[in-house]
Amino acid sequence: MASRMQDPEQLLTPAEVASMFRVDPKTVTRWAKAGKLTAIRTLGGHRRYREAEVRDLLQDQTPEQRETAAS
């Protein structure tokens, strides 16, 4: 029988996503509410974000957007 356990997708916390974009974790939550990121809820109600989706969003940023996010 084939195992259902494939390579699990890496999930990131709001703080980890925030550090990648150099923004506050509350900003990441606002992005999720606005539909810019897909939030997955854990059993405890915490938000987690798919690493692949976050990295795609990070790659789509222009250099000007990165500078604005850093300030």
Image: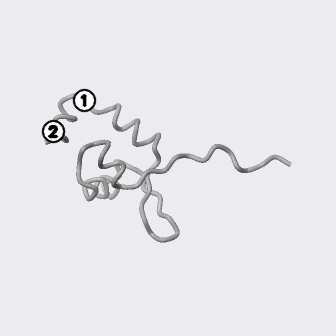
Q: Bin the neighbour count of mark 2 within 10 Å (Cα to Cα): few under 14, some 14-19, many 20 and up.
A: few
Would residue 65 be found to the left or right of residue 20 on screen? left
Query: 7 left or right of 25?
Result: right
Q: Residues within 10 Å of mark 1 (few under 14, many from 20)?
A: few
Instruction: Look at mark 1 in the image and give the residue it sits on.
Output: 62
Residue 8 horizontal side relative to residue 34, left or right:
right
Q: Say which residue appears at 43% left-offset and 51% top-offset.
A: 12
51 or 19, which lies in front? 19
Q: Percent position (x, y) of residue 30?
A: 28, 57
Q: Residue at x 31, y 58 (%)?
A: 29
Q: Residue at x 43, y 65 (%)?
A: 46
How many marks can you see?
Answer: 2
Q: Position of residue 15 (x, y in %)?
A: 33, 54
Disc 2 marks which residue? 68
Q: Position of residue 38 (x, y in %)?
A: 42, 52
Would residue 41 be found to the left or right of residue 16 on screen?
A: right
Q: Quick one: SS at disc 1?
A: loop
What colour-coding does the image apply?
one colour
Residue at far bottom of view: 44
Three-letter residue code for mark 1: Thr
Quarter of image, res 20: top left
Q: For mark 2, give the secondary structure.
A: helix
Label 2 amino acid?
Answer: Thr
Quadrant in the picture for the C terminus: top left
The quarter holding residue 59 reads top left
